[in-house]
Image (cartoon, coloured by chain):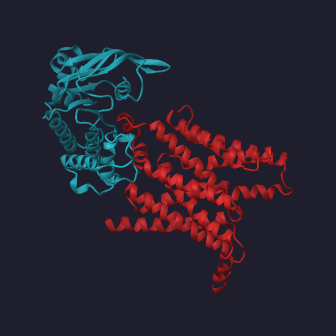
Amino acid sequence: MSEFFHRLNDYLQFPFVRYALIVGVLIALCSSLLGVTLVLKRFSFIGDGLSHVAFGAMAVAAVVGLTNQMMIVMPVTILCAILLLRTGSNARMKGDASVALVSVFALALGYLLMNIFPTSSNVSADVCGTLFGSTSVLTLTKVEVWVSVGLSLVTVSVFAIFYNRIFAVTFDESFAKATGVKTTLYNLIIAVIIAVVIVLAMNLVGSLLISALIIFPALSAMRVFKSFRSVTIASVLISMVTAFVGLILAIGLKQGLPVGPTIVMVQAGAFAVFFIAGMIKQGVKR
Amino acid sequence: MAQLACNHLTLGYENGAILRDLSFSVEQGDYLAIVGENGSGKTTLMKTVLGLMKPLKGEILFGDGLKKFEIGYLPQQSFIQRDFPASVWEVVLSGCLSMGKFRPFYGKKERERARKNIEKMRLTELTKRSYRELSGGQQQRVLLARALCATEKILLLDEPVSGLDPKVTAEMYEIIKTLNQEGITIIMISHDIRAALHYANKILHIGKENFFGSVEGYLATERGREYTAEIAEEGDYE
């Protein structure tokens, strides 16, 4: 145990470890904000789909040779988010079907491109890193840290400003629209926020595990809390704490655990705790 | 001038019209019941009046000081998210959203209005409870309070009593009647022809042949007489 804290203390001397903690917790904060909305709109998997899109876009960016991959990854992901959330409202193709379609296509395309135009000698390590997050959160440059901080701030403020509208659009879209709320606009805002969050979160947990970051905190909070506001606040706190604990464990344990899966495991543990707490609460009431 | 007038509406989707040449109007204080078989287009009509979809032909006119987004709407229960975590207070307050045009948060005026309508629907002690834990009748009252936050003029109710037990159904009809007596125009979509004939003053029957007019006028039609005969067999509404 003391060895664990000793090693942790050593690592915390490095700026990149501190950056990772800051950025990790901020990303966790942003990604949990829209969890409730996505779960209730039956879009739990949109995070997954979009992150595969981002993966594909990243591969394209690498092949083209862009140094700043965000330039291409961000717009492509936002565009796909808008298109995917739109199909939910006018149902030519069901939401989950189109998400599945887009996500496997982008994943396949990305892997194909990375193999045809390899940018390094070890393609599978690259792919694995992008999919599961590996150590990319520990290799952030100062600029990337500031970009993450900035985008997080924007995300949180947009969410706060439109909080009441997001609630109305999620709870009962028809009513909101009938009373003059611009539902299309707010769905668009939701889509853009999600896309931004996904691209940010890829650094932390990798493409394949982003859904966990989005839905675990919301589902945990919904077990115990009953109002939209308390669920939102609780899921933000759960998300930040689990991300922090996950990062500390990943950094401090001897074997050097991969960050993404460690965080997801901690979140799964938190979900179990809240699940049981919810059952006890229900039991007490009856 | 009528508060709401629909002139020669043709309704439907890209691949075909469901309703043709439908005209009706309501004055302030009217209680209009819209009846018709399943699939006759009642929900489509409602969506059109609410502005959720556009009519293929015809026009909807708002008058008498009523503006387009001032229709309060009570959706069918099944359209609402069942497991949504939201308190009664949050749901009712969301009805005030159209009041504070561009402000991000609710002000004193909105909160006061929500409180007033919660009280009116006798929900005060349930304010902090979760919407999903309430009984069907209580949930309907919450949604009604929300609708009243959005309007003081006209309410559109889509099957307001479906899924409620007889006692709660009667309560619900009484609440609607009281609101109507306070001067709020009611447009109610209903399967329950007996209640429609009992409470409404105007009937819109949609189907193969549309009918719009007073309850007396409706009872004089062939279809109206069939229903009266049925009701006579089963006893009056009350």
Q: What quarter of the picture does the N terminus of chain A occupy?
A: bottom right
Residue A52 visible at all: yes
Chain letter, cyan: B
Q: What quarter of the picture does the C terminus of chain A occupy?
A: bottom left
Q: Name the quadrant containing residue A174.
A: top left
Chain letter, red: A
Say how many tags the image has: 0
**Residue furthest bottom in the image:** A2
At which x and y percent is residue A51? 64, 49
Residue at image coords 37%, 45%: B103
* B202 vs A164, nearest the viewer: A164
Q: Name the quadrant containing residue A138.
A: bottom right
Answer left or right for A256 relative to B12: right
At which x and y percent is residue B71? 29, 32
Residue at image coords 50%, 19%: B15
* A35 vs A197, nearest the viewer: A197
At which x and y percent is residue B125? 22, 57
Residue at image coords 57%, 69%: A244
Residue at image coords 17%, 24%: B201
Residue B158 visible at all: no
A5 to B54, vertically: above or below = below
